[in-house]
Image (cartoon, grey):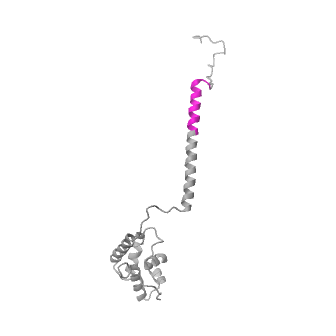
Amino acid sequence: MATSRKETTTGNGEQSLGGYLTELREKRTLSREDVVAQTRIPMHYIKMMENDDFSLIADQLYLMPFLRRYATFLALDPDEMVIRFIHEVQRSESSVVRMSEPIVSARDRRGNRWRTVAIWLAGALVVVSVVALFSHERHRASGNIETTVPAMPHQAAGNAQPGVE
């Protein structure tokens, strides 16, 4: 079952890897579903490879094992397809305009706000604890806090004679 698809080309006018894979699959009258069933490659990876759209994946290198399996299925040299894939990715990344500052979403800012509040509260708690500890130690050293020393069991209050037991 052939799907209608606009032929994709690379920047220098040659057919893209995705266009090439799609063309070979369609020449063999295979649907994407056939490829999924026979290779066990998830459909979303087949679509990514054939459409040259890697926006749904964090790192294109994750596709390498699937690309090798797909190339083998289509009777292509897997190493050659991987090299072609790497060249296309490098070419597309070199033409991307990089931003000088990352985009911060509202969700990221909200998370940062709570993190900042938590850090300030933890810092305040540490400061209060340290002040309370030093204050307690200072009062104890100056004698303002009474410390009781237990009397010796054989001494009665007021009857004790120094040096006599």
* Left or right: residue 165 compared with residue 2: right
Q: Position of residue 21 (x, y in %)?
A: 40, 82
Q: Position of residue 151 (x, y in %)?
A: 63, 20
Please tell me which residue lies in front, 136 or 14: 14
Q: What residue range appears in magenta?
A: 128-144
Above or below, 57 against 116 in this view is below
Task: Examine the image and state in which quarter residue 97 appears.
Answer: bottom left
Residue 38 inside the magenta-drawn segment: no
Q: Position of residue 117 (x, y in %)?
A: 57, 50
Q: Position of residue 131 (x, y in %)?
A: 57, 35
| Residue at image point 56% right, 61% down | 107
| Residue at image point 47% right, 80% down | 36
Residue 129 inside the magenta-drawn segment: yes
Residue 34 shows in the view = yes
Secondary structure, magenta segment, majority class: helix
Please tell me which residue lies in front, 27 or 142: 142
Please tell me which residue lies in front, 27 or 131: 131
Residue 40 shows in the view = no
